[in-house]
């Protein structure tokens, strides 16, 4: 498979190594505006693009992939306010986009665990709920996309919770998310239910970026021949795919 890498920071480099390990070829690397001007036209040679850049760059990169009719795997977060518009454009133009705030298989299993725990804790209103996330200092968005997914899944399952907010709060209607940035931490997420008597805590700790890279390359392999807007649940549960 011929892959274009849009973004070549630490994640892009991990994806490069993982893709070649799985027998794929990198035909284009774009890491700045100048590279787009010089060789962006080579995107048409790719069978899929994998996009890990910044919130300010992601939308233009996605639209460039749509223009060349190249399926795009997007791991950039921080642009959720534009999600509905991009999803609609993807479907209306019959393009292919796979988005996940986190491509780690373990994190997506953690999402399932979080939803299940929220469903059984819904009736226990004596437990306050909070989320903490820690990432490397180069991550621009806070809270992380993964933490937002965790919070939104809690809100969907627990009626008394209406919204998430930055920082830890005492308002019983809110789920507080505390963000930390530390040198070269791939990602740690903690969901805590705490009462006066005890605490129930679930944690996911990423040890290396290789897990994210593997998930992104697996998504690139999976999307071949498909049209539409996809997420990790479609890859992990193909019988529930939107096609």
Image (cartoon, helix red, strand yellow):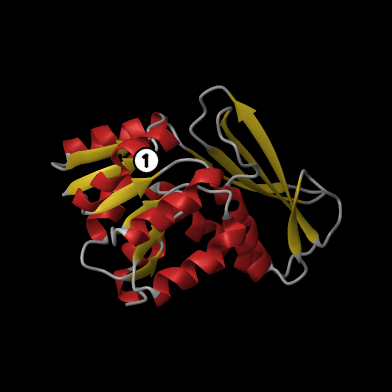
Residue 30 placement, left or right of 84 = left
Residue 133 placement, left or right of 207 = right
Identify the residue under disc 1.
36
Residue at 27%, 47% in the rendered image: 41
Neighbour tally class for label 1: few under 14, some 14-19, many 20 plus, Cα within 10 Å: some
For residue 172, above or below residue 209: below
User: Is residue 83 among what the camera can see?
Assistant: yes
Where residue 174 appears, x then y in whole percent?
Answer: 79, 58
Residue at 38%, 65% in the rendered image: 230
User: Is residue 211 among what the camera can see?
Assistant: no
Residue at 68%, 65% in the rendered image: 155
Mark 1 residue element: helix
The residue most toward the front is 37
> Which one is in front, 25 or 67?
67
> Which one is in front, 45 or 207?
45
Which quadrant of the figure has residue 93? bottom left
């Amino acid at each position: 498979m011929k892959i274009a890498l849009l973004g070549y920071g630490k994640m892009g480099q991990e994806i490069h190594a993982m893709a070649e390990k799985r027998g794929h070829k990198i035909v284009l690397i774009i890491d700045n505006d100048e590279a787009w001007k010089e060789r962006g036209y080579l995107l048409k040679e790719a069978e899929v693009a994998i996009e890990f850049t910044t919130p300010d760059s992601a939308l233009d990169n996605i639209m460039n992939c749509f223009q060349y009719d190249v399926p795009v795997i997007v791991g950039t977060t921080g642009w959720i306010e534009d999600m509905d518009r991009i999803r609609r454009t993807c479907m209306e133009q019959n393009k292919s986009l796979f988005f996940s705030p986190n491509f780690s298989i373990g994190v997506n299993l953690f999402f399932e665990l979080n939803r299940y725990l929220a469903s059984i804790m819904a009736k226990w209103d004596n437990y306050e709920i909070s989320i903490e996330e820690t990432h490397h200092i180069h991550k621009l968005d806070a809270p992380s996309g993964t933490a937002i997914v965790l919070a939104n899944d809690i809100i969907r399952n627990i009626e008394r919770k209406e919204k998430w907010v930055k920082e830890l709060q005492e308002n019983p209607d809110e789920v507080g998310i505390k963000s930390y940035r530390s040198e070269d931490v791939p990602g740690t997420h903690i969901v805590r239910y705490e009462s006066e008597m005890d605490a129930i805590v679930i944690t996911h700790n990423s040890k290396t970026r290789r897990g994210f890279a593997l998930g992104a390359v697996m998504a690139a392999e999976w999307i071949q021949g498909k049209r539409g807007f996809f997420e990790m649940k479609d890859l992990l549960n193909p019988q529930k795919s939107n096609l």
